[in-house]
Image: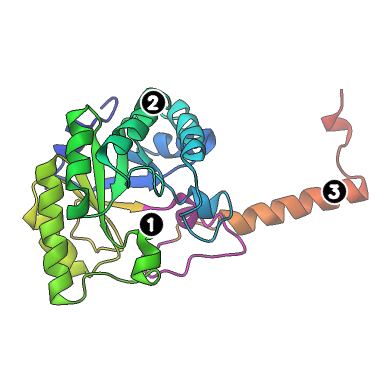
Amino acid sequence: MGKWTVTKIKALKGKGRIACVTAYDYATARMADKAGMRLVLVGDSLATVVLGYSNTLPVTLDEMLHHTRAVVRGTENALVVADMPFMSYHVSPEQAVENAGRFVKEAGADAVKIEGGAVRENTVRALVRNGIPVLAHIGLTPQSIKTMGGYKIQGRQAAEARTLVKDARILQDAGAFAIVLECIPRQLGVKISKAVKIPTIGIGAGPGCDGQILVLHDLLGLQAEKQATLSFVRQYTNLGVRAVKALEAYRNDVETGRFPDSRHCF
């Protein structure tokens, strides 16, 4: 199939499920790419799962650029999308173009992701007009947790649902190549997916979306001390616990003199 592009992703609308995952460095990017992921997102979830912050707001533009470069180096086929961090695109479309341009020019990203509905229409238009593909993101938008009052399911009320459908259409018309739908009722996921002609990528939005995305650390169980508790997260393995056990075995071997032995010496 070769390198996945925005055009190829858009062509999958209604034709197949698009498997997507986050990655944050060369090693995780290599794993995701070898597994055949169509789209790899350098998520601002970097803030919580890699850098140890309590939410995504503190991660900086420079930090996101640094990790995007590593992911690009580790990816051959997947479309690499860089998450634009909080306040890197909020001030003006001009600010958004300047910062998004750095992800493409300096880090080698194929596209960027921004959060927000109709309020981002002009920003999306400006980015696309300047040759920067945009993955939109509506529903639960983690960069807005201060105004949302935390991580809460969105679109349960009829008025909220209508707004999200309208937002999706506006973002499509502005030029977004796909839309992430996060933490919304499954039937609303179906409704939005049918209302737009571009792919929808769900995370806690039900099976009716054109694709799905999960945070790699949740999927692999990499956080041994903090296992995933969200209902929409499926943990496919528990690498965190297995890694701790391996490290404990190593420590014990060192302390008891079993490592290194003659096989590990020159």
**Closer to the observer: label 3 or label 1?**
1
The residue sitting at 45% across, 42% down in the picture is: 23
The residue sitting at 38% across, 57% down in the picture is: 143
Secondary element type, mark 1: helix
Say few, some or many: other residues with alpha carbon within 10 Å of mark 2 (under 14 / 14 to 19 / 20 or more): many
Alpha carbon separation for disc pair 3 and 1:
45 Å
Residue found farthest to the bottom: 157
Q: Please state which amino acid type lies under the numbered disc 1.
A: Gln
> Which residue was labeled with disc 1?
143
Question: As drawn, is 54 to the left or to the right of 232?
Answer: right
Question: As drawn, is 142 to the left or to the right of 245?
Answer: left
In the depicted view, which residue is nearer to us: 179 or 142? Answer: 142
Alpha carbon separation for disc pair 2 and 1:
24 Å
Q: Please state which amino acid type lies under the numbered disc 3.
A: Asp
> What label sits on residue 51 in the rendered view?
none
Residue 70 is situated, as x and y percent measured from the top left of the image, at: 50, 31
Residue 34 is situated, as x and y percent measured from the top left of the image, at: 42, 34
> Which residue was labeled with disc 2?
108
Secondary element type, mark 3: helix
Residue 259 is situated, as x and y percent measured from the top left of the image, at: 86, 41
Q: Please state which amino acid type lies under the numbered disc 2.
A: Gly
Whether residue 109 can be seen here: no
In the depicted view, which residue is nearer to us: 15 or 74? Answer: 74
> Which residue was labeled with disc 3?
253
Q: What span is colored magenta in the figure?
A: 214-234
Say few, some or many: other residues with alpha carbon within 10 Å of mark 1 (under 14 / 14 to 19 / 20 or more): some
Secondary element type, mark 2: loop
Say few, some or many: other residues with alpha carbon within 10 Å of mark 3 (under 14 / 14 to 19 / 20 or more): some
